[in-house]
Image: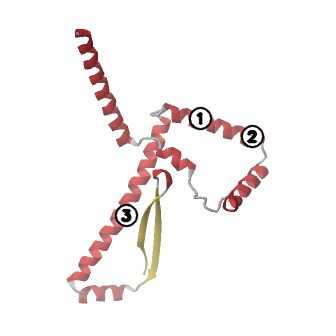
Amino acid sequence: MYTMQFSKVQILHCTNFMFCIEFHLQSELSESDEDWSDNEAGSPSSLVSKFKQIQDVLLSVQIVLVYIASLGERIKNLFQWSVPFCCWLAITLSLLAATVLYAIPPRFLILAWGLNKFSKRLLNPNYIPNNELLDFLSRLPNDRELAKWESLDRDSKKSSKKNSRKKKKQ
């Protein structure tokens, strides 16, 4: 029986408050007879350690799924114009990219991309790579952040109405 196990999941803090997630998969070939004989003869502590390992794997999978869902919510909020400046920026960059793709042949674009990719380390040895698209999406709110913003907006409107009433009375 062939099984895949997560041996390690690392969540690294990258530039611009972005989380980079690395999975290290460990594959191993195991026979089902050996696994069952180990479990029957094993101590309860080994069973508890296996449950802890399963909990760790499930927690790491949950963290990854939450991150992916958050990215989906951010993309949804981009198309719903939650942050108008970012939406206009995305439209402008999309139109600019369409114009560049129309005007310049793909061969030259691939050549420029390759030169840029391989010359970054030569020109700046301390270069830290980042993903501009994920940086842009990290600036958009997910649904939870959007709800907090709306509640703050309502609270600020209530307080401004109270302040304007007080000023009118004086």
Q: Earlier in the sequence, mark 2 or mark 1?
A: 1
Q: Residue furthest top?
A: 169
| Local crowd size for mark 3, using a 10 Å CA cut-off: few (<14), some (14–19), many (≥20) | some
Q: Name the image quarter holding residue 62.
A: bottom left
Is 161 positioned to the left or the right of 129 in the image?
Answer: left
Q: Real-space Cα distance between discs 3 and 1? A: 35 Å
Tell me the number on the disc at residue 60. 3
Tell me the number on the disc at residue 91. 1
- In this view of the protein, which residue sits in the foreground, 11 or 49? 11
Residue at 42 percent across and 53 percent down: it is: 67
Q: Real-space Cα distance between discs 2 and 1? A: 16 Å
| Local crowd size for mark 1, using a 10 Å CA cut-off: few (<14), some (14–19), many (≥20) | few
Q: Quadrant of the C terminus?
A: top left
The coloring applied to the image is secondary structure
Residue at 29 percent across and 89 percent down: it is: 37
Is 137 positioned to the left or the right of 106 in the image?
Answer: left
Q: Earlier in the sequence, mark 3 or mark 2?
A: 3
How far from the left and from the top, in percent, is residue 2?
A: 44, 79
Which residue is label 2 attached to?
102
Q: Residue furthest left?
A: 44
